[in-house]
Image (cartoon, helix red, strand yellow):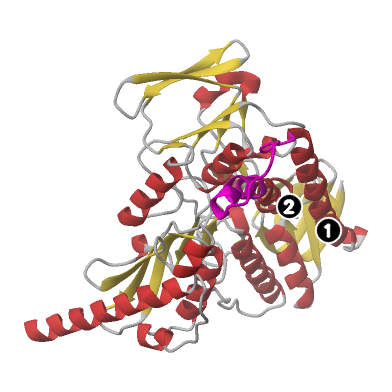
Amino acid sequence: MKTVQVDVAVVGAGTAGLAAFHAARKAGAGAVIIEGGEYGTTCARVGCMPSKLLIAAAEAAHAVGRAAGFGVHANGGIRIDGHAVMDRVRRERDRFVSFVLRDVEDIADAERIRGQASFVDDHTLVVADHTRVTSKAIVIATGSRATYPDSFESLGDCLITSDDVFDWYDLPKAVAVIGPGIVGLELGQALHRLGVRVAVLGRGGRVGPISDPEIRAYACATLNEEFTLAPDAHIADMHRYGDRVAIRRAGPTGAELMEYFDYVLAATGRTPNVTDIGLDRTTLELDAKGVPVFDPLTTRTVSADGASPIFIAGDAGNYIPLLHEATDEGRIAGHNAARLALGSAVQPGLRRARIGVVFTDPQIGIVGGGLRALKPGTFATGQASFEDQGRSRILLRNKGLLNLYGEVASGRFLGAEMLAPAAEHLAHLLAWALQNRMTVAQMREMPLYHPVIEEGLRTALRDLDIKLGAARGNAGNAA
């Protein structure tokens, strides 16, 4: 067996792993990157990019259908060519993957090791049956995989995950999406707009990442105007029926429905790829799900002796499983692994203000962790509706509700939740304000053009400023 000694070993060549490797090398450490699967990130292969390609096709189809509202009519109606739609998705997906592969190929052969890595101890890895790697520090960046309940296995080849969708050569007639999270909502609406009969079914009432009950109710009602969204579906039975799937569930009136679908798309979450890498042979402290406990500011894991040489980044840590967070975590992990290997202390890295976007239409935006991150009684809420907002009505996109949160004691902006047109842009503006610790009064001084969708922010900020002032006045009177 070949033996390799190195300063930093990075396990996983996805978004976080590549960022960690380059950060370690930039910091002056010798490093290797180990990959047991295909090169190419989750984002490029089965995540962000192919899903947005499918959504883009769906938006084009929807725009043609909506044109009549402007007095513009498409003669002959809309014809969706499923073969052509999926051909573009696959071609462009492969193009994005090629960019990642180019980055990997730029890494010297001696610094790339192929094969499944497993821990021997805190400083040692065995890769397949051919290489033993001893390092001063290790970064776990093994990513995640789609998961679903064991009971779904009985559906056979009618069961798919989001990983499978982007390899389709045509669009099916009917799909049941189980799980109204980010993936379920995005793919469900996109498939519906491309002519697929869709039902998005959940349990417990969750709608994407929304925690504000008012925004959640508005989102559910709005999306239900277009396709079936039952976030608490009460599925009584789901079984294979010939070459289809039969689902029996409670309908809107309480009576049972029996529906048939070509596929069940399990959008029930992802789990970190840490179960088969020998963590039981390390001194790491694991949480209830078997994931290493770590400090988000340094990405250093927690070990029995308090001096762990192991760092974790990206989906493997399951802290904030988003691409931009994986990039930041990888950079922090690689930098700190190099510092530790070269004899310096680890340092907290930059953790940016939290931002999340769901590319439905209207889009969902969450800033700063949303309502769930706030302590009751310490904040006020400002609101704006987009139903009568000028630019939104001009574009026939006048559906949406925005809630902003501000701290009563300081007047500082704390976060937001929204279902809104152009939420991806509104959320960025708000995340920048949050990271700069702006007060609501300071945000109201920022420039705005007319007529733009962003004017909805001004409405919500004005409402929030008034409510913050009233809350402070009431607190003063009580004192």
Q: Quadrant of residue 467?
A: bottom left
- Left or right placement of residue 216 versus residue 451 in this view: left
| Residue 479 visible in the current orientation | no
Relative horizontal placement of residue 380, taking residue 154 as reference (left or right): left
Provide residue 356's location: percent of width, then percent of height: 52, 61
* Sequence-earlier tag: 1 or 2: 2
Q: Is residue 128 left or right of residue 479?
A: right
Asked whether the residues under the numbered discs 1 and 2 touch, taking CB atoms below 8 Å apart as contact, a structural biologist would say yes
Residue 30 in view here: yes
Q: Residue 94: where, in percent of width, then height? A: 82, 48
Q: Is residue 265 above or below residue 381?
A: above
The residue that mark 2 highlights is: 44
| Percent of width and height locating residue 463 | 30, 75
Density class for disc 2 (Cα within 10 Å; few <14, some 14-19, many ≥20) is many
Q: Write the start and end of the magenta stretch as one range.
A: 58-81
Looking at the rendered structure, the secondary structure element under dot 1 is helix
59 or 296: which is nearer to us? Answer: 59
For badge 1, the amino acid type reads Phe
